[in-house]
């Protein structure tokens, strides 16, 4: 699994390509963005087209949904 993560981290993606892995991506300008499989890599709002690098898994995979207690949600 660690080897697979290293392969993802080495791969760079261009603006407009399809996202292959859910997770956090960093662009050439230092911005980070959560993307999910099936999204398109966006352009930077000010700098335009950029390259993206896989930065790690989404924290959403590790969080548990809140428990429902009657009419309110308990965290």
Image (cartoon, rainbow, N blue to C red):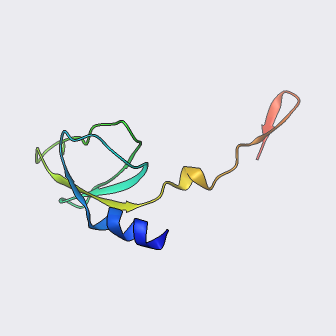
Q: Taking 29 as reference, is 36 left or right?
A: right
Residue 30 lies, in percent from the top left, at 24, 61
Question: Which residue does the image show at 22% across and 41% down from the upper left?
Answer: 17
Question: Which residue does the image show at 41% across and 66% down from the upper left?
Answer: 5
Q: Taking 70 as reference, is 19 left or right?
A: left
Question: Which residue does the image show at 46% across and 72% down from the upper left?
Answer: 2
Seen from the viewer's position, the closer of residues 18 and 56 is 18
Seen from the viewer's position, the closer of residues 3 and 22 is 3
Residue 62 lies, in percent from the top left, at 62, 56
User: Outermost residue toward the top?
Assistant: 71
Instruction: Determine whether 53 is above or below 17 in the image.
Output: below
Instruction: Determine whether 47 is above or below 54 in the image.
Output: above
Instruction: Determine whether 31 is above or below 49 in the image.
Output: below
Instruction: Determine whether 55 is above or below 71 in the image.
Output: below
Seen from the viewer's position, the closer of residues 42 and 16 is 16
Q: Taking 47 as reference, is 10 left or right?
A: right
Residue 56 lies, in percent from the top left, at 42, 62
Task: Say how many tags the image has.
Answer: 0
Residue 61 lies, in percent from the top left, at 58, 52
Q: Taking 74 as reference, is 41 left or right?
A: left
User: Outermost residue toward the right?
Assistant: 70
């Amino acid at each position: 699994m660690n080897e697979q993560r290293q392969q993802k981290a080495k791969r760079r993606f261009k603006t407009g390509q399809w996202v292959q892995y859910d997770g956090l991506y960093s662009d050439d300008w230092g911005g980070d963005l959560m993307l999910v499989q099936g999204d398109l890599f966006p352009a930077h709002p000010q700098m335009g087209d950029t390259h993206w690098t896989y930065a790690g898994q989404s924290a959403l995979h590790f969080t548990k949904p809140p428990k429902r207690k009657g009419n309110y949600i308990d965290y």
